[in-house]
Amino acid sequence: VIPKEFMIDFYEYFFTKNMYDYCKINDNAYEVIKELNEKYKLIIATAYTFKEDIINSGIILKQKYDFLLKNFDFLIIYSVSAYSFNVL
């Protein structure tokens, strides 16, 4: 947990780095996801926003989109949407 007095520094640092540059794809993940995608209509649902900085959260969406296309080139991106909801 990051103390409140350091949150601004955290977000400033976080938004200057692309966290997906540091991600490693697990062994066989490409092949497994490709095979699943050929057999089923594969849907990847993911979150990317920080409620503390909605405006800059779009940076993360672009980074994630680029990461998926680069590493899973067979995926077809149908739609990118942003929704707000509460989970009870």
Image (cartoon, helix red, strand yellow):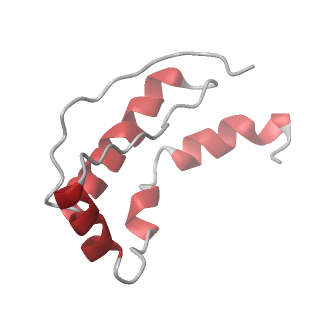
Q: Is residue 53 left or right of residue 7?
A: left
Residue nearest the viewer, comparing 68 with 38: 38
Residue 75 versus residue 59 in the image, above or below: below
Residue nearest the viewer, comparing 13 with 58: 58
Residue 21 versus residue 14 in the image, above or below: below
Residue that protrudes farthest toward the front in the picture: 39
> Residue shown at 58%/31% (left/top)?
50
Q: Residue 18: horizontal and vertical position, in percent? A: 41, 55
Q: Residue 21: horizontal and vertical position, in percent? A: 38, 65
Q: Is residue 82 visible?
A: yes
> Residue shown at 53%/16% (left/top)?
84
Q: Residue 73: horizontal and vertical position, in percent? A: 15, 60
> Residue shown at 57%/41% (left/top)?
12
Residue 83 versus residue 72 in the image, above or below: above
Residue 44 versus residue 38 in the image, above or below: above
> Residue shown at 45%/41% (left/top)?
46
Q: Is residue 71 visible?
A: no
